[in-house]
Image (spheres, helix red, strand yellow):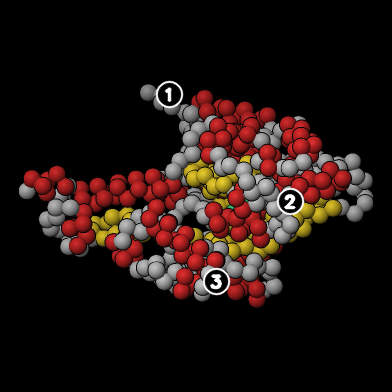
Amino acid sequence: MVSAVPDFVSPDQIRARFAAGLSALYRAEVPLYAALRDIVAAVEAEMAGGSDGGAVERHGAIRVGTPDEMRLVARLFAVMGLHPVGYYDLAPVGVPVHSTAFRPITAEALAINPLRVFTSLLRLDLVEDPALRAEAAAILARRTIVAPATLALVERAETAGGLTPGEAEAFIAGALDVFRWHGTARVDAATYQRLLGAHRLVADVVAFGGPHINHLTPHSRDIDRVQAEMAARGLPAKATIEGPPRRRVPILLRQTSFSAVAEAFVPAGADPATAPLRHTARFGEVEQRGAALTPAGRARYDACLAALREEGAAPEAAFAAFPDDFAALHAAGLAYARYVPTGRAGPAASLAEALARGLITAEPITYEDFLPVSAAGIFRSNLAEADQANATAVSSQAELEAAIGRPILDPFALYQAIAEASAAAALTALGCGLADTARA
Ligand code: OOG
Ligand code: NI
């Protein structure tokens, strides 16, 4: 019998190939990023056990201009198995965007390819000058960021339930096109300067043909060494690593980056023979991920960070209240855990008892999301000091969800579900599900 189900390429495979294409594209567009990749690879190769796959990017970032563009990229990302997780409001720190991360949501999908895309929607309502706001909106309304042939493939994936190998190949090429750099602006030099005057982010989003990939970020197991190596090789590294200080048990996310490069572009209507203008927005970043924290852990983390920033305490002192031992973090309810059977058998009336008897161990769950404070630091280190938007706007997850066309998933709920599923599986593997044990 001939199967009625067509031979579709899995979304995870589409994402893996898209990620490889994006990496090649960005290395070609931003040579300094290729240098950063070399440093990360060298540090990884020198570490015990050799490279852990630092060759694969863990995230990238884009910025879109309108709710319709947000909806379009959300549909494009869905074809490659990326779903909106987490709401990040950057307005309170003076960046006129709100954001989500499109990311894989299962351990299996993350293992095949972990690429996430931090996606920000410009908030033109935060541009103070009404004339400029209207002008920017009109400019954005006239651009098409996804070519019709690519959009047709998105629709095909949505209606047919997937893409055949040939369709997937065309889709990946079309998707890469959406995120490439446009060396020619859609606005003239005077308009570019006016947009820049409102906020550098406004110029970055509005002046060009599409949401160019803004940075890519490989992973390193030793971000401090990458940071030192960047300085040694003369890369313009940002002064500090964002996130928690170096610890025995890494938590959440540590990040560093090199400053944005000045890229040549030709304004609309300009003679290409005259000297081009330069746009400074795109950079390269490195991340090191640690354990996902519970809401209680996150609150403790935020308090430590506040102490660090407001009281000027040394990082180690500010984080002294945070246990640096996974068993202690877990026992205090600060970190999520994946529960793994140790292979030892025995009775246990509860998960706690199984843990206490050494029948099950608790392992950290890697944090797969972003940190608003770090994101603000990353944005800011690539903006001029004077770039400050109106910080009084109200945050609106509902507005961003309306643009995306579906609810944004709660990261805490995803970690909790992983923890619970692993607990149930571990207890079952032990041959003493809680109900059985209760009866015994
Ligand atoms: C996104 C900045 C946020 C991160 O790693 O926190 C980010 C942007 O610059 O568009 O990528
Ligand atoms: Ni980033």
Q: Nearer the viewer, residue 188 or 112?
A: 188
Mark 2: which secondary structure?
Answer: helix
Q: Quadrant of residue 175?
A: top right
Q: Position of residue 169 (x, y in %)?
A: 59, 38
Whichever of callouts 1 and 3 sits on the residue coming sooner in the sequence is 1
Q: Residue at x 76, y 34 (%)?
A: 134
- 252 relative to 68 in the view: left or right: left
C-alpha separation, residue under disc 1 versus residue under disc 2: 52 Å
- Give the residue type that dot 1 points to: Ala
146 versus 351 height, above or below? above
Q: Is mark 1 within 8 Å of ligand 1?
A: no
Which quadrant, please, contains the N terminus?
Answer: top left
Whichever of callouts 1 and 2 sits on the residue coming sooner in the sequence is 1
Whichever of callouts 3 and 2 sits on the residue coming sooner in the sequence is 2
According to the picture, the residue beneath numbered tag 1 turns out to be 4
According to the picture, the residue beneath numbered tag 3 turns out to be 312
According to the picture, the residue beneath numbered tag 2 turns out to be 200
410 versus 158 height, above or below? below
- 434 relative to 93 in the view: left or right: left
Mark 3: which secondary structure?
Answer: loop
Q: Position of residue 282 (x, y in %)?
A: 69, 55
Looking at the rendered image, the disc whose residue lies closer to the viewer, 1 or 3, is: 3
Q: Position of residue 382 (x, y in %)?
A: 68, 58
- Give the residue type that dot 2 points to: Arg
Crowding at dot 1, Cα within 10 Å, few <14 / some 14-19 / many 20+, comes out as few
Looking at the rendered image, the disc whose residue lies closer to the viewer, 3 or 2, is: 3
C-alpha separation, residue under disc 1 versus residue under disc 3: 65 Å
Crowding at dot 3, Cα within 10 Å, few <14 / some 14-19 / many 20+, comes out as few
Q: Nearer the viewer, residue 4 or 422?
A: 422
